[in-house]
Amino acid sequence: MKIPNYLFYLATTLSLWGLGGLLGCSESSVPATSKVDSAVTIEKQFQQQLDDLYRAAQSTDENFPGATAAFILPDGRIFSFATGFSDVSRNIPMGKNMRMPSGSIGKTYAAAVALQLAQNGALDLDTKISTWLGEEAWFSRVPNNDELTVRILLTHTGGLLDHAFASREFVEWVLTSWTSGNRDAYLRPRQLVEFVLDREPLFAVGEGFNYTDTGYILVGIALEEATGRSYYDLLRELFLQPLDFAFTLPADQRALPDLAQGYAHESSKFFGTPLEIVEDGIMVMNPLTEWTGGGLINNPQDLVRWAKLLYEGEAISGEGELDQLLQIGFMPEPDKPTDGYGLGVSIRQTEHGISYGHGGFYPGYNSRMVYFPDHGVAVAMQINSDKSNVAEHTMTLAGTVLQGLLATRQSG
């Protein structure tokens, strides 16, 4: 089966495109009343822009049933929004607090868990994963197995294929699981790794970049072996509970609360999934297969707070953690030295300045979060369709926020 280029793009593209050139701004000299007024203005403009994007998409080939979105200002205030429908056939409007799978944005959490464990002295990111996995019978068949470290895998520079989009056998398993009617079926982490065993490495370790869920699955296995704890338990203990995320949950079962209906226009073509991903409040597939390749349901309100905490160095405790997080593993474009991929973070120069963030694809859903360190602002968006222009829309919405802040500064 030939893998369509459009779906590979949807699942692996990480670039965050910028709109509008803005200078950094600070609200420190703006009176409190002006701050409130400017926030109200930006809030209204953001909702209007979100509604405009929704309406405009209805006359195109984009599938945009509905969306949730949020932004966080430099002072930490969060504003949340919704547009369109959570369930089109039942005429249910999208709610601000609806959850959706956030796909590969979950990699930002997996990388944070690994880095926090390293800061705690539980492991070294540069230790070869053979330290924990070398005795397992299958490990010698992993491409480049003797050179792989946690850091290498987190930066996608290990030369591994991606089982999800480069393995015919994985696609066939998914197709078979749908047609068999076994909706609880899922693949365990070591079963996922089997899809790349005995394959030729794409390149020597550290000499290229290939985005791969498989590398993050190996990281998850290594973290569990190094600590004797489950990945989701570590995630809850290190981040979800202490940071009090109200909307972020492990996608570890089919019954998950407050899910928006997802419309799998692309995945139904490629994987043979049903068009609608939620039936009677329960997902029609078991999300456990995704695990450390993503593995969460979320809402933009939590995503923008996570982005701000993570990329301002407040989420992970320790010395030099932010420098490590943002260190690019391989520079794919030498003429763009600021662009690349760090530890679970896509780094890109935009017209708003540098941006940090990630995108996410899951059958029926597209997600994006982006943080602008020059401005202290993060914006996130989730659309309940896997055939949407979520990256472009998120950057349009970011422009609305940043232009509003610039206008406040100029008027102050």
Image: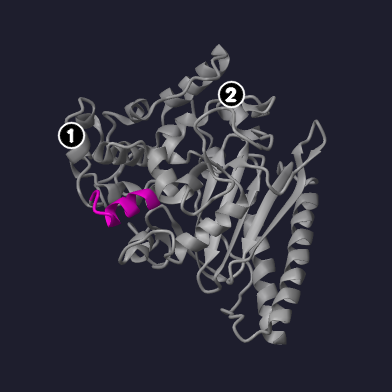
Q: Which residue is mark 1?
A: 134
The answer to whether residue 18 shows anywhere in this view is yes
Q: Is residue 247 above or below residue 170?
A: below
Instruction: Give the extent of the magenta segment.
Output: 112-123
Q: Estimate the x, y position of residue 136 in percent, counting from the top left.
A: 20, 28
Q: Amino acid at mark 1?
A: Gly
Q: Is residue 408 above or below residue 283?
A: below
Q: Is residue 40 above or below residue 364?
A: below
The answer to whether residue 156 shows anywhere in this view is no
**Alpha-carbon neighbours of circle 1 within 10 Å: few (<14), some, or many (≥20)?**
some
Task: Name the residue nearer the viewer: 308 or 380.
Answer: 308
Tell me the number on the disc at residue 22.
none
Badge 2 element = loop
Q: Estimate the x, y position of residue 352 in percent, counting from the top left.
A: 57, 71
Residue visible at 54% across and 70% down in the picture: 376
Q: Specify the farthest residue to the top.
A: 180
**Alpha-carbon neighbours of circle 2 within 10 Å: few (<14), some, or many (≥20)?**
some
Magenta-span inclusion, residue 251? no
Q: Quadrant of residue 411?
A: bottom right
| Left-right relation of 293 to 53 | left
Residue visible at 51% across and 59% down in the picture: 307
Badge 1 element = loop
Q: Quadrant of residue 278?
A: top right
Q: Which residue is mark 2?
A: 272
The dominant secondary structure in magenta is helix
* Quadrant housing the C terminus: bottom right
Residue visible at 40% across and 61% down in the picture: 333
Q: Amino acid at mark 2?
A: Gly
Magenta-span inclusion, residue 119? yes
Q: Specify the farthest residue to the right.
A: 91
Q: Estimate the x, y position of residue 144 in percent, counting from the top left.
A: 23, 40
